[in-house]
Amino acid sequence: MFDLNQIQLALREFQLDGWLLYDFRGLNVLAHRVLDIRPDSVASRRFAYFIPAVGDPKKLVHRIELASLDHLPGEKVVYLKWQELESGLEDLCRSASKIAMEYSPRNGNPYVSRVDGGTIELVKSFGKEIVSSGDLIQYFEARWSPSQWQLHLQADVHTRMAFELAWEMIAKRTAGGGSVTESEVQSMIMDHFHANGMTTYHPPIVGVNENSGDPHYEPFPGKDRPIRENDFVLIDLWAKMDVADGVYSDLTKVGFVGDSVPESYEKVFRVVADARDAGIAIVKDSFENGKCLYGWQVDQATRDVIQAAGYGDYFVHRTGHNIGQETHGNGAHMDNLETQEDRTVMRQTCFSIEPGIYLPEFGIRSEVDVYVDENGKVWVTGGVQNSVHPILTAE
């Protein structure tokens, strides 16, 4: 819910003169969320909304969409011609010098860069300093409410159960020389989610042997692989409770179809697990000791472990991503590979830690979810896997 007082408090905390929220045809979905604009609203013309650190907001709307920002407080300025748009933007932020926008220098963080370069150039031409709104966005978009934390814990129960059901299905179907396909396991997991009131944007990954070495492998019926005894299996799944404000649980675990796990798998798993634990450790240490923590630092902590073990070339993605109502949310990611994530790791946000090593024969990833509550306590959900699961071992 839009809260002007909270936004202005945050602007003063971040030492900003104001926040210019601009959009054209829904390209800046982040602005829509901050401004509580309905997903089904029709906006075919450019609009802008300026929130000063102190004082009343102002809005700029097109003449044929006069009501587009009527749910928000502030004086309305109407434009028709492009010249009026440009002069209107200048007037909106005339009293400010340092302004936040959905922008990232050199597009270093594409998750935040939602305003086109030309508009950034235009605002800069007014003599304004433009800074990234990345931390503002996650402050208002990525922090969880207490009820969302409870919804995550509820989802966690069912996602963890999905692994138990998957291992059980594989064990039963591979007994006596039998098999089960990747897509059959995938379908069973989806049925489990639906039966427990969950939803997800995409079916889970179920990859056997070399398929597990593809971080974004997708099994398809008729084009996937059978799982048999002595095979290695990776399962990556994500889902949330199918209710308003539901947030995701996103987990990855690995297993071996046997009653004991060969050392070749355990050796690589231990490296991945050590890297995962190093990522968790830096988060806990930072919040226990009041240190500012950036997303790139978490990634580097895990990456250093894998590089030191000689597998650096086989860790081909970031360490983790923000988690929210989308499985890849709009808060800080744990990344110093694809981007240098310079947003801070904030309280009341959740993110994955999921380092991996992907070899030609198999790939290993271990993924948990980490939530930092409002008091700075760090919670790890999903169940920390300490070794490759021997699927045929009776429990």
Image (cartoon, rainbow, N blue to C red):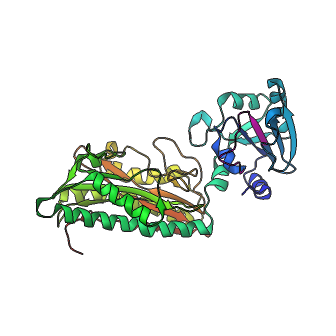
The extreme bottom residue here reads 395
Q: Describe residue 357's horizontal placement relative to residue 21 as left or right.
A: left
Q: Kindly tell me whether residue 280 is visible in this rendering.
A: yes
Q: Position of residue 151 (x, y in %)?
A: 54, 67
As displayed, is residue 392 above or below residue 10? below
Counting the numbered discs, the total is: 0
Q: Is residue 42 magenta?
A: yes
Q: Position of residue 270 (x, y in %)?
A: 29, 60
Q: Quadrant of the N terminus?
A: bottom right
Q: Nearer the viewer, residue 201 or 287?
A: 201
Q: Describe residue 145's horizontal placement relative to residue 359 as left or right.
A: right
Q: Describe residue 204's horizontal placement relative to residue 18 as left or right.
A: left
Q: Nearer the viewer, residue 302 or 161?
A: 161
Q: Quadrant of the C terminus?
A: bottom left
Q: Is residue 374 magenta?
A: no
Q: Position of residue 196 (x, y in %)?
A: 44, 67
x 17%, y 66%: residue? 260
Give residue 262's quadrant in the image. Answer: bottom left
Give residue 63's quadrant in the image. Answer: top right
Q: Nearer the viewer, residue 64 or 18?
A: 64
Q: Position of residue 38 (x, y in %)?
A: 69, 49
As displayed, is residue 246 above or below residue 27? below
Residue range in magenta is 36-49
x 43%, y 70%: residue? 157
x 31%, y 47%: residue? 219
x 73%, y 49%: residue? 35
Q: Main secondary structure of the magenta part?
A: loop
The extreme left residue here reads 176
Q: Kindly tell me whether residue 384 is visible in this rendering.
A: no
As displayed, is residue 390 above or below residue 265? below
